[in-house]
Image: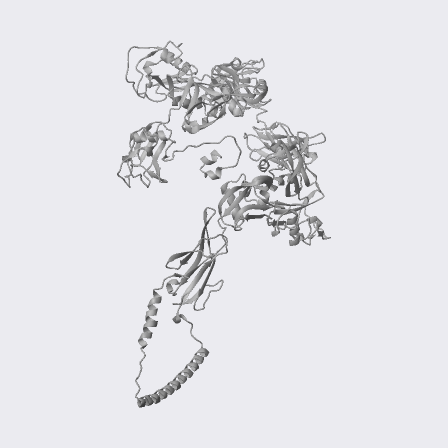
Amino acid sequence: MEIECIQSGSAVRDCVTSDSSPVITNVTCADSVRLLNGSSLCSGRLEVKSNQSWSSVCEADFDQQDAEVVCRELGCGPPSVLQGALYGEVEAPVWSKEFQCGGHESALLDCRSSGSARNSCSLGKAVGLTCSEPDDVRMVGGANPCAGILELKHLGEWRPMYEFGWTLKDAAPICEHLDCGSAVSLQQTKSSLKFGWRIKPDCVKSRSTLRECTTSGYYNPIMNLTCSDSVRLLNGSSLCSGRLEVKSNQSWSSVCEADFDQQDAEVVCRQLGCGPPSVLQGALYGEVEAPVWSKEFQCGGHESALLDCRSSGSARNSCSPGKAVGLTCSESDDVRLVGGTNYCEGMMELRHLGEWRTVSAFSWTLKDAAVVCKHLDCGSAVSVNSRHESLNRPAWWIIYDCVHVRSALKDCTASSSHVFILNITCSESVRLGGASRCVGTVELKHQGEWRPAIDYDLRKAAVLCKHLDCGSAVSAVIRPKSSPADVLEISSDCFQSGSTRSECAAPNASNYTLDLICSDLLVQPIIHASSMDGVSESQEQGLTVSRHSNFTIRCSIQPQYPGGSFQLTFNSTNTTYSYTQPAVNHSAHFLFPAAEPAHQGNYSCVYHVYVFSHNFTAESRQLSVTVSEFVSLVGGPSRCAGTLELKHLGVWRPMDGSDWTIKAASVICEHLDCGSAVSVEWREDSTEKSVWKIQNDCIESGSAIKECLQLWLSSFSLYLTCSDSVRLLNGSSLCSGRLEVKSNQRWSSVCEADFDQQDAEVVCRELGCGPPSVLQAALYGEVEAPVWSKAFQCGGHESALLDCRSSGSARNSCSPGKAVGLTCSESDDVRLVGGASRCAGSLELKLGEWRPVEASEWILGKAAVICEHLHCGSLDYVEARNESLLRSVWRLKPDCVQSGSALRECATSEYSLMIMNFTCSDLLIQPNIHAFSMDGVSEAQQQGLQVSSRSNFTISCSIQPQYPGGSFQLTFTSSNTTYSYTQPAVNHSAHFLFPAAEPVHQGNYSCVYHIYVFSHNFSSESRLLSVAISDSADSPAPTASTVHTITGVVLLLILLIVITALYFSWKASRELKLRRKENTDVVYYNYSDHGAEGGSAEDESHRLKGAHLKSK
């Protein structure tokens, strides 16, 4: 887990990687209380957790004893501040009862609480709590509590603290934390490897608490710290300056100026490990703060501690403003340069904590060395270099960033051991005050003061240029001044006799100064070389570049004067030549497109500039360039295919085949001038053997191939196939770019007129990509000479472009915008298998063969790309599944996939037991929605349903069988309202019946299928279906022919009814006469009974209007 990642605010799951380790981490959190918005882990607004909910606490329900329990529960010290709204206002919900702790409980929720409840809290009343930091640091084994081995109590355990890279300045907060005075000394105590605490100094300096900066591990050496126990200097610019305070009876007191003199100051400075006092002045570092020291000190100046001095019998209780003792001690840095021709040059040694040691040369510059030269009362820093020692020996390590902020050397010094020792050369107490150290007015340092110097014998100026390591004198001019000034007149034979410093000069008054220009006024230019194949030169070595690879030599110089030019000179056994470019931003770049044996030799940069009416030059060191072959593919059908072998340290060995992707292998193909990478195979040998192993992440970062090598034992080797005659340049992937074709060891651009779709199909196949998707001129850049001379005439079935026929005509040029730009589709064959749908199951990838994908190195957030790639929505969850047998798998690099690279560019061959199972959000197929009406009007596939008013209709939801159970939700939306109905899925379908269509049913319907599988809820929605309700009034007007037909039918029906009525009337009259004659009774039928049974039309209408949705 990347700690910096978590601290940046990223989600925990985004910061997790897979690894193996014997060490695991145990974390203990407070499960029911927390402090928010505070400045540390022990301060903030209090919240309490109950029933999975965090609640604010009101000030009225919380007191000092409750606070003691909370601070103890959080592992902090006793409460120091309890104040409403100190860290923000109340946020709902609010804790409902009053806490009634006794103060001895181990957790707040163990306390009793009142029976009354509250639901709100007034503004400004949220509990804000500050707990003191626990006193979990101590010194043991020393002469007093302020000296000894530093130990820290963390997680309930005392352990020593590991010392590495700590300076006195870093240790000062520890002394302050222990209520001791200033940090006096810091030493390492050697011991056996112990389990201890490590505190990062940078964390402490950021004002975080000690326990927040602590990590554990096995360490050696441990820290031995000495703090002054009774005096300290506050508010100063270093540990040796500030307002004086004295400690007695556990209380710090200010000291009044009237009670303190120079001899007292000498004792204090010595006690603090500083040099003699340089400034003693009242209120220099602030006013008196109560309490005030009550007696006058009467030191003799020889005492080792201020409290060892005698004091007067009289006492005072106050001190006038501006009278607090402000003391500046000189820095006690004992520094020297030894082994040189004079005291201003040699190996740097520093006396710290009573011990002289050399100084590590790590990262020192002339700017850093200038501090030392100034401290030694020498002139300018002339050179800085390192001397290699045969044995690793104790040395002082000076934190140069600390020196730059004007801290004393001793405040910035840590103990270390190194083999590279610092050597510094300073000019003696003479300098040139001008634009650079080799031009300007001659100045000498005399009695601690720099003054202009004059020498009327200009011939001796050359001696001064040589003395300053500035070459020879170019110009020496005596310039008049407007008024006499104090100068130092140089004795005529001073420099020639070898005398130094003030021996050469005598004070005088003069109207003249000496201005000197030396030949070496320019700093030395810098030469640097780099190659696109990743082989870059180190500071002291030359450049080794592969043949045909391009390389660049860069000349630069520190800014001194504008303009100028760089001349790159080349020397070999056979020839000498040079190239010149103007200096742009003080640098120039010389590009060599293809390295050849003729480029092998020595290069240097010469800077030319015209200033001060003279031409000046400065030359860099020499850089050697070697052109060689150290990578090859062997055992294949061509030089661009085979087992990858590499020569390193004079030995050819095969390359380990694990962890390689096509994307990484493309660097090798480019290095061999072999076009694009087509395939990477992992071949197993019968026995293990010595191989070179390259982390391809190292190569992809642009590092040199040889910088990424390590010796390995493996039975696997890398078999690489590159396209040897075609390549795509400047594209977004290996399958896109500007086309180039290779013939006779030369790459040529191809013109659009000579290339068509069938030619493109051959190229895409040759590169191992999918069919061409875009063929467009200048899509990836313009034509670059030379140009392919003939038109390709492929049939589309060829395996390589150069196998195709070509035209007899030839061309030598191609119009702008006509270079072939080709995009092949990616040939990614990826699938999820073994699940209930295409969006769930084990991830498999086809790179020549189908294999599962290994479940290593994956971070949950990055796996989502796979679901997007399969058009399966977002990632729902991913898991690793353990197989019973080791099997061949593909390993996908998550960062590579996330960058947008094709999957095949991110895959490596591997054996593993763990494979990856995915479930994507779109694992359900889309439900079907269908509607029909009993009046026979049914909806078409792409149309809605047209149903007559008061007719019933049904909407059916269904889905293809995937999982048992589930439910359907029918959602309805119109311009006025939205509602839904739910039914369980029966045989993977549900039917929603509407007994009587009404206008309110008109709108859009959709089916949403819900199911709970794989411990997650999933849903899938159908297309929208529109339903329109119509009645007779809305029916379309009949045509004229329809009207005539209907009229004829109606007349015939009326005529038939009249005839029938006349017939039955005649018949009824005749029967009546007969019945009367027969004197027979008449029988009546009760039609009202029939009416009650069927119901009136009006009643039926009312019934339909009240109909509600029914399930069929």
Q: Residue at x 39, y 10 (%)?
A: 303
Task: Count all numbered tags in the image, as a single digit.
Answer: 0
Q: Residue furthest right?
A: 808
Closer to the camera, 197 or 538?
A: 197
Q: Residue furthest left?
A: 116
Closer to the camera, 693 or 583?
A: 693
Residue 192: x and y, percent? 51, 20
Q: Is residue 455 visible?
A: no
Q: Quadrant of the C terminus?
A: bottom left
Q: Coloured how?
A: one colour
Q: Is residue 409 above or below residue 941?
A: above
Closer to the camera, 930 or 148?
A: 930
Q: Is residue 464 above or below residue 563?
A: above
Residue 637: x and y, percent? 71, 42
Q: Residue at x 32, y 31 (%)?
A: 67
Q: Residue at x 51, y 24 (%)?
A: 368
Name the quadrant containing residue 524: top right
Residue 940: x and y, percent? 48, 64
Q: Is residue 590 above or below residue 776?
A: above
Q: Is residue 1056 left or right of residue 863?
A: left
Q: Is residue 495 visible?
A: yes
Residue 570: x and y, percent? 67, 31
